[in-house]
Structures are given as structure tokens and as C-alpha cells.
Image (tube, rainbow, N blue to C red):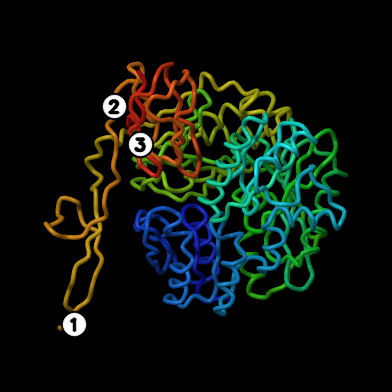
Amino acid sequence: MFTKILIANRGEIAVRVIRACREMGVATVAVYSDLDRDALHTRLADEAYSLGGETAAESYLNTEAILSAIDRSGSDAVHPGYGFFSENADFARAVTERGVTFIGPPPEAIEIMGDKISARLAAEKVGVLGVPGTTEFITNPQQVQAFGNQHGYPLAIKAAFGGGGRGMKVVTEESAIEDAIESAQREAMAYFARDEIYMERYLTAPRHIEIQVLADAYGNAVYLGERDCSAQRRHQKLIEEAPAPDLPDDVRTAMGEAAVVVALSCGYTNAGTVEFLYEDGVFHYLEMNTRLQVEHPVTELVTGIDLVEQQIRIASGEPLSFSQDDIAMSGHAIEVRINAEDPTAGAFLPSPGRIQALRVPDGFGIRFDGGYEAGDEVSQHYDNLVGKLIVWGRDRDVAIRRTLRALADFDIQGVATTIPADIAILEHPDFSAVAHSTKWVEETLDLSDVTASIGASTANDDDATTTMRREISVEVDGRRFAVTMWVPQDSQPAGSTSRPRAKRSSGGKPQDDGQVTVPMQGTIVKVLVSVGDLVTAGDPLCVLEAMKMENNVSASKTGTITEVLVGLGDSVGAGDVVVVIN
């Protein structure tokens, strides 16, 4: 067994792994960006090392900084969590070449399955067929046009080295191809540090079913039932449940057996998930995620198996202690993702900010996996998952009712969350009747009356002290050391070094006078207009990235562009004016 595990991640999943390690008597090492220096995962770990930087690219995707933390801490294993480097074969190989164990599949398996194109080919070789798609990377719009002409629209452009809906864009017509390619590549690079993309047909009303697998280094592999993840928006899951309801037993078994065959075909070890789309009684292979899934807790609640513990045991060389016949399901579990997003009228706009108050529900069958506590800041630079509410019931109806009760007890102030939309989903008769699909939230569910309250205002947070970085020299027993300190901004002396603040445009003016403002804090990743351009109300003016999601900022009225106040890479805050229309 390992003595010290470094968690190369942040937020909820880092906290989850730290707690599992603590139960197993294994020491933990956290890594953190400048913005996360006081984050919950750093407070819980036995040790914590700075990666520097603010954005993911500067910190959690900085290979050399993480490898340095591994060396300095003396860690003998690395858990990648999900996202970031969890499906990056180069990172896994860099870790193992140091004589440190990567808690995940071998780099060779990641290369096969982490690349969604080679994964399609590998699955086809063992008779597991997917949705019609390409087996080469997209390099120009003409490839997409040809595919659309052959297979029709809509089609999906997807990140080849990612998952979770990140870097995925749906194209409904030929004119949208170029913008979709650019947007998919930007998101893929921001979240996975790889921008290769591919395409496939986009089914009209499928259910998203995935199979959890475990495989050890001795040829043993099992599947731990399935999860239904069909309640989604923007291809991001909102609610997951296990087992998948209203699924014929023969389909359930066939999916599970297919998942094991796919895993064994690529020499897979550790935990992984094989995803399928199910429509009209037929299932299609979608992809394999070579990592732990966000929604793994629902499987844990119905099987009684701690998946993170199993990951660590398998990586340390232990064989699986159970076989397929030993696995039994009990009851029904539902997971609700609590995201810092404002679902008002179905917009789901990112809502970064400081969590002023947080009271999580409790009671029989209720679990909360969180990455924040009251007083913590949800940054626009990272994923917006605050935590996950996981509820067990003896059957699906009980689980739904218990989840609704728990959501009613949930109190979070300072940021808007998806809770009102989650309640609307769970209360809807279509959800109860399993009449929903991956398109249902966006195409059928009426969220026009849904509103979200931020609660306590963070606009003038007198309790929150703004700090800045200072480099100073100190002497200890006559020896000089260079020390980095974070001090209140007001205490900065003249001439000291500080991190520059991003330039902001003026804000706070209404849009009906032609001043177009942004609804949230974020970064401008594309400017689509210039001074003198004619625009129509609703036309996109620029693209704002917040919490790894891209959002179009649109014209509030028809007219001529008289001012463009932002450029590529500019940071903006909620209410800032970005464009003026006359």
C-alpha cells in the first residue's frame, strides 16, 4: 500500500480522494493555484504545494509544476481525479517514469481509449458498435461539410481527448460549422490541454447510459451496474441515477458485458466508464472515460463498493476481492450536481463568487460530496461544481421524494445554483415516467418561471479581505531567504511586487441605451465585431468564457457598432460594458 498520495486536482474530487486516503491510513498531498491557496482541499490534506498561476493552464495543467510537487513531497502515487490530466497519457507516463504510481489505467490504455477515435476503432474490433462517426481528426471545415452531406444534420463536433461534454458543439446547419470547430477547439484546449476534435451523428432523443467497470492487473474485470445520465443541458449532466430505470434486463446485461469486453480489449486496469446511447431499444457505443466519473457515488450507494478505495488498491497491486457474481444492487440512488450557475429562465449562466452561507441537508440515505465551505470563493477560472447531493432510497419513487426534501433543506448564499432547475426536473411527470432524453431539459422542460436567488450579496463584502502577492526577504539565524507572502491589499508598501489586476471596462449601465454588458465575470475569448459594423438585435458580438463554458454576448438592439471596449483575453466583471451600439 502507498504511504503518500498526491492529488493532482482541486475542488470536490480532491476532497473526495483525500477523505478516502485518510480512511485507509494514507497521507495526502494537495496542489493548488494562487487562487486556491486557502481552498478546502488544501486545508484537509496533510501537505500542500503551490503550483503558481491562476488559470488552469498556469496551474493544474502545468506538468512541470505538478511533477516538481511530486518530487518535493516524496509522494509514491498520484491520483488525477477527473478532468485536467486524468486522461492524459503523456502525464501518466511522466509520473510513472519517476517511479511513482499513476492511480489509473496504463498510459497505453489511455492512449487507446482517451483518444475517442482510436477508442471507436478498438470497440469496433470487438464487435461493440457506435454511432456513425469519423475515425480521423477534423482538420478543416470541408470534412464536416462532407460528413453532413452524407449523414445529415445535426452532427456533433467533440474533443478527442476529453469528456463530460467539454469541447462538444452541436451543428444543425452548414453555416455553423466553422464557429463550432473554433469553439470546440478552444474549450478542449482550456480544459484538457489538447485541441484535437472529431465528429459523429447526433441522435435526436437518446438516453445516456453508462457502465462502471473495474479491472485489476491480473485479468479480472467486472461491471458494477449502470447509470442513467440523461438529464443534461449543454451536454453537461445535471442529474444521474443508478440503476437506469425502465431498461430491459437483457439490454442491461448486454451493455455490461460489452463494457467489460471493451475494457479488456485495451489492457485496461483500474476504474473506468463505458458510455452508451440508448434509443428505440438499441444501444450504441459512445466512448470510454479512462478515469473516475463525477457521478460515481450513485454506483457506490447501490453496490456498497467504495470506488476510490478500489482504485487505490488496484493501483497498489492488489487483485479484485470480488467477482461479477458477488455484485448485488440495493435500492435506487440519485445524484444532483450543485453547480454555481443561474438557471433563471433556463439560461444556466455561470455564477462565480463567494459562498456566504452553506447548510447542506442531512438525514437517512443522504450524502453530500462538496469542495467548498462557507467563506470560500468559486472562481470563474475553474469548473463550477460546488458539490454533489447523493440520495439513496429503497426504490426510485422514494429516492425522488427524498431528493426533493433534501434540496428543499439545502441553503447556499452568495452564488446562484442549479437547485431550482433540479427541483423542476425531479418534480416533472416526464422524469417520473422516464420519458426524458438528453435533449429533454433544453427542448421540453419549461424553465421560464424558474428563478434563482443569490442570497447574501457579495458586491460589497466587507468581511472579505482582498489580498495580493508580495515577494520579501527575511533572515533566519543570519541566513537570507526569499519568501512569498499573501497580505491585505491595503498593506502593500510602495515599490513592492504585486500581481497586476486585469483591466476592466466601465459597467453598470443599462443595455437599452446601446451599451451591451456581460452578465457574469469571465474572459473574452473571441471578438466578433468591429467599429462601424451593422448588427441586428440578437447577433453575437463576442464570446465570454466563464467556468470553462463559452457564452455568446449578443446585441441588445439593431444598429451600428460605435465602440468595442474589450479585446481577446480581457477579463471582465458582471455588468461591464463590452460594446456600444448606436
Which residue ends up furthest to the front in the rendered image?
A: 532
Between the residue at mark 2 and the residue at mark 3, the CA separation in whole angstroms equals 16 Å
Corner quadrant of residue 281: top right
Q: Residue at x 62, y 65 (%)?
A: 89
Q: Position of residue 309 (x, y in %)?
A: 61, 64
Task: Name the amino acid, label 1.
Answer: Arg
The residue pinned by badge 1 equals 479
User: Which residue is located at x 22 percent, y 76 percent?
Assistant: 481
Q: Quick one: SS at disc 1?
A: strand
Mark 1 touching mark 2, by CB under 8 A? no
Residue located farthest toward the bottom when viewing the structure as drawn: 478
- Kind of residue sitting beneath label 2: Gly
Most foreground residue, 404 or 166: 166
Local secondary structure at mark 3: loop
The residue wearing badge 3 is 566
- 20 on left or right of 126: left
Q: Residue at x 59, y 70 (%)?
A: 102
- Identify the disc placed on residue 508: 2
